[in-house]
Image (cartoon, rainbow, N blue to C red):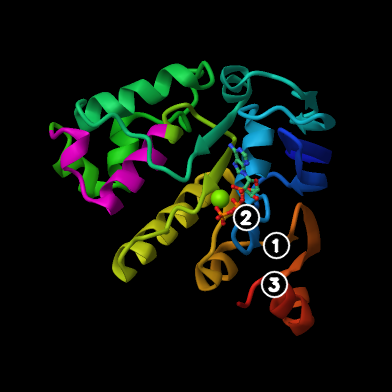
Amino acid sequence: MLLEAHELNTYYGMSHVLQGISLTVPQGEIVALMGRNGMGKSTTLKSIMGLVKPKSGSVTFKGEDITGYPPYRVARAGIGYVPEDRRIFPNLSVLDNLDIGVKGGKIADSNNPNVWTVARIFNHFPMLQKRAEQHGRLLSGGEQQMLTIGRSLMGNPDLLLVDEPTEGLAPLLVKEVRDILEEINKAGVSILLVEHNIKVALSLADRLYLMGKAHIGFVGTIAELEAHPDARKKYLEV
Ligand SMILES: Nc1ncnc2c1ncn2[C@@H]1O[C@H](COP(=O)(O)OP(=O)(O)OP(=O)(O)O)[C@@H](O)[C@H]1O
Ligand SMILES: [Mg+2]
């Protein structure tokens, strides 16, 4: 198993926002984590990434126990993180924003043809190439999202944690971001995807976890979810 989170319990002060969350991401898959607002999806990603510290539970990645690692060590182990708020550097160019992504990640083996380079990123994101010299702040929301994803790839992750990449984007861009995630996955990057857009998630994911408040309420394939309309109703529909 590529990623295995086991029985995570995370608190913000007194509030117990993850109550025994367990999930796995097999090598090569896209796994979606879904659920209504405030259930704990982002906190689950942050707990894996080391941005918040679970009180108990464990995280294993490629067989290594990375529980309690600070974020930079989690990144170096091979996990990339695309946060909900697109944290690009507004006063740096697109190119410089990408270069920064190299530093956080894994030390790449330059003989490996699968290493992510600026050229390879531009291949996947032609719109970023056109704007290579422009400041981050001049990019549209969709372009900023592409840049955030591109930057996380520069760290050569084996697994990307992506938090609501299509949120607030126009339909055309939703489709573009969706397609890019699919391409990245085909290029060998496994993905744990938090996504509100049911259509996007169902069209990408091999497997789904549906969260209720602080817990996982349903795990299954798309076909298994289709066989359980009650679960869809309980955890997804408003
Ligand atoms: N920094 C924080 N301090 C205190 N409480 C927090 C903090 N961040 C999140 N929470 C609370 O923890 C719970 C889980 O939040 P989280 O952001 O993980 O939910 P989510 O499923 O990602 O929601 P959304 O779909 O709105 O992004 C919520 O009740 C939220 O209000
Ligand atoms: Mg969230």
Which image quarter holds the N terminus?
A: top right
165 to 49, vertically: above or below: below
Q: Nearer the viewer, mark 1 or mark 2?
A: 2
Return the disc, 3 or 1, that comes first in the chain's sequence: 1
Q: Which residue is mark 3?
A: 222
Question: Residue 174: where, in percent of width, then height?
Answer: 37, 64
Question: Residue 33: where, in percent of width, then height?
Answer: 65, 56
Q: Which residue is mark 2?
A: 38
CB contact under 8 Å: marks 3 and 1: yes
> In the image, is residue 138 part of the stretch drawn in magenta?
yes
> In the image, is residue 93 part of the stretch drawn in magenta?
no
Q: Which residues fall within the magenta stretch?
A: 134-151
Question: Residue 76: where, in percent of width, then height?
Answer: 58, 20
Q: Main secondary structure of the magenta part?
A: helix
Helix, strand or loop under label 3? helix
CB contact under 8 Å: marks 1 and 2: no
- Some atom of ligand 1 lies within 8 Å of the CB belonging to the residue at label 2: yes
Which residue occupies 80% across, 63% down?
217
Q: Amino acid at mark 1?
A: Leu
Q: Amino acid at mark 2?
A: Gly
Q: Which residue is mark 1?
A: 208
Is residue 110 in view? Answer: no
Question: Residue 200: where, in percent of width, then height?
Answer: 50, 67
Which image quarter holds the C terminus?
A: bottom right
Of residues 224 and 9, the one nearer the viewer is 9
Q: Amino acid at mark 3?
A: Ile
Which residue occupies 22% across, 35% down?
136
Of residues 115 and 38, the one nearer the viewer is 38
